[in-house]
Amino acid sequence: MIPGVSLIEILTVSTLMFFIGVYGFLTRKNLITILMSLELMLNGAAINFVAFNKYLYPGQPNGQLFALFLIAVAACEVALAIAIVINLYRKIKAVDVEQVNTLKH
């Protein structure tokens, strides 16, 4: 157990992070801010993994390993997505979702 911090408080923070990310993902038009929102959602999930592991199985590092795996997957996802965004910007000089939808082959 973490002194002074309950599981409910940690889950509240991670839930807020996740749903702020969902809101940003659904409402933003810029691809960069959509990626940032996706990262918020992944970080909220990582906090959940660590919090549940700490409070349910304090002697085992399973939650931390899942969180590290999630961070590695998120880093790969960001690298690939930034490469796609840079390529789109070079082609159409914009990173707005609506302008990407009008892109002709």
Image: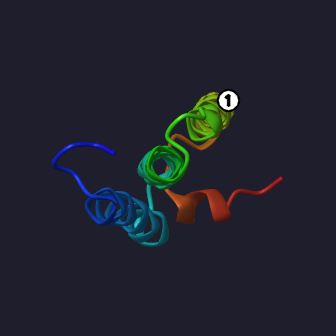
Instruction: Report if residue 86 is visible in the image.
Output: no
In this view, the residue in front, 61 or 44, is 61
Q: What x and y, as percent, mark residue 66?
A: 64, 39
Question: On the picture, is 61 further left or further right than 7?
Answer: right
Q: Residue furthest left?
A: 4
Q: Amino acid at mark 1?
A: Cys
Instruction: Report if residue 80 is visible in the image.
Output: yes
Tag 1 residue: 76
Q: Residue furthest right?
A: 105
**Residue at the spot x=40%, y=71% of the render?**
23
Q: For mark 1, give the secondary structure.
A: helix
**Residue at the spot x=63%, y=32% of the render?**
65
In this view, the residue in front, 101 or 18, is 18
Res 1 → quadrant? top left
Question: On the picture, is 19 further left or further right than 103?
Answer: left
Q: What x and y, as percent, mark residue 7?
A: 34, 59
Res 24 → quadrant? bottom left
- Work out whether 56 lies above or below 72: below
In this view, the residue in front, 10 or 81, is 10
Question: On the picture, is 84 further left or further right than 95?
Answer: right
Res 63 → quadrant? top right
Q: What x and y, as percent, mark residue 19?
A: 40, 69
Colour option used: rainbow
Please count the marks in the image: 1
**Residue at the spot x=26%, y=58% of the render?**
6
Q: Residues within 10 Å of mark 1 (few under 14, many from 20)?
A: few
